[in-house]
Amino acid sequence: MKKILKIAAIFLLIIMIVSCTAGPNQLANKPDKEGKVAGFWRGLWNGFIILFTFIISLFSDNVTIYEVHNSGGLYNFGFLLGIMIFFGGSGGGAGSRRRR
């Protein structure tokens, strides 16, 4: 009985992990209502304002933190870079602290 429970638990864990994986963005490289596709600079800006956008998105259905009509890799790179710039990203301050 314990062996069956272990197998069931492992199977359930695998199903839970697989169900959380990201899928393809069907709207990548497709223009939005205004005919625009977000690129690197828009990704950088969206990453930089992510904290404020997230807070607003909790109260509004019209605001999202990620632009789905994007150019793919360049938008994602800009988005990640913007987040790193906003939150300090490199951790350089922590590494330069003196130990006593």
Image (cartoon, rainbow, N blue to C red):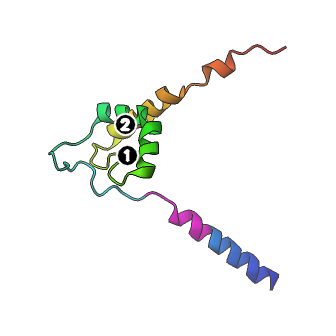
SS for tag 1?
loop
Q: Quadrant of the C terminus?
A: top right
Q: Quadrant of the N terminus?
A: bottom right
Disc number at residue 23? Answer: none
Amino acid type indicated by mark 2: Asn
Q: Residues within 10 Å of mark 1 (few under 14, many from 20)?
A: some
In the rendered image, residue 16, in percent from the top left (x then y), is placed at 58, 67
Q: Quadrant of residue 90?
A: top right
Task: Classify residue 30 as left or right of residue 5.
Answer: left
Q: Residue furthest right?
A: 100
In the rendered image, residue 26, in percent from the top left (x then y), is placed at 29, 58
**In the image, is residue 20 part of the stretch drawn in magenta?**
yes
Task: Classify residue 2 as left or right of residue 41.
Answer: right
Depth check: give the residue in front, 58 or 91: 58
Amino acid type indicated by mark 1: Tyr
Disc number at residue 66? Answer: 1
**In the image, is residue 84 part of the stretch drawn in magenta?**
no
Q: How many marks?
A: 2
The residue at the point 71 percent across, 77 percent down is 7
Query: Which is more N-terminal, label 1 or label 2?
Result: 2
Q: Quadrant of residue 15?
A: bottom right
Q: Residue furthest left?
A: 35
> Marks 2 and 1, Cα distance to the nearest angstrom?
7 Å
Task: Classify residue 43 as left or right of residue 98.
Answer: left
Disc number at residue 46? Answer: 2
Depth check: give the residue in front, 83 or 26: 83
Above or below, 31 relative to 3? above
Highlighted range, magenta: 14-22
User: Is mark 2 in CB contact (under 8 Å) with mark 1?
Assistant: yes
Q: Residue furthest front?
A: 59
Report the predominant secondary structure element of the magenta stretch.
helix
